[in-house]
Amino acid sequence: MVESDLQHFKTETVKAYGDMAVDLTLVKGIALKSMERLTIIEIKLDNHTERFDRLETRQDEQTRVLHEHTARLDRLDTTLNEHTTVLSEHTRALQEHTALLTQILARLPEKP
């Protein structure tokens, strides 16, 4: 009976060690595959980071150009406002001259 129990224990132990070896092999395989995937993800992440850095640089350049254009448009707007003021003064003077000419023409005798 003891020999039978000992033999049964040995059989179960060998089977358990075999099962553990298979499980450990599977875990090792999964871990190695996970490492490969993580390496691929890291490479992709590095590529994306480089691309975002390039995009950020380009956006900074575009922002700088936009600020330059905004400054130029502000200057043009100021000049346009100055010209509008001068034109308004000329329009007012022309209206005054037109009024004077109308009064002068009203006082002139009509042609025979």
Image: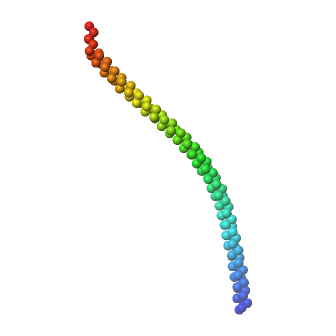
Seen as rendered, the residue at the extreme top is 112
Please determine whether, in this image, residue 106 is positioned above or below residue 84.
above
Percent from the top left, x then y, of residue 42? 65, 58
- 89 or 50: nearer the eye? 89
- 60 or 24: nearer the eye? 60
* Quadrant of the snapshot with the N terminus: bottom right
Q: Residue at x 48, y 37 (%)?
A: 74
Please determine whether, in this image, residue 106 is positioned above or below residue 75.
above
Q: Residue at x 64, y 52 (%)?
A: 47
* Quadrant of the snapshot with the C terminus: top left
Seen as rendered, the residue at the extreme bottom is 1
Q: Residue at x 57, y 45 (%)?
A: 60
Please determine whether, in this image, residue 59 is positioned above or below residue 81.
below
Is residue 48 toward the left or the right of residue 11 in the image? left
Percent from the top left, x then y, of residue 43? 66, 56
Is residue 67 toward the left or the right of residue 109 in the image? right
Residue 61 appears in which quarter of the rendering? top right
- 88 or 20: nearer the eye? 88
Please determine whether, in this image, residue 28 is positioned above or below residue 47.
below
Percent from the top left, x then y, of residue 70? 50, 39
Percent from the top left, x then y, of residue 72? 51, 36
Q: Residue at x 72, y 87 (%)?
A: 6
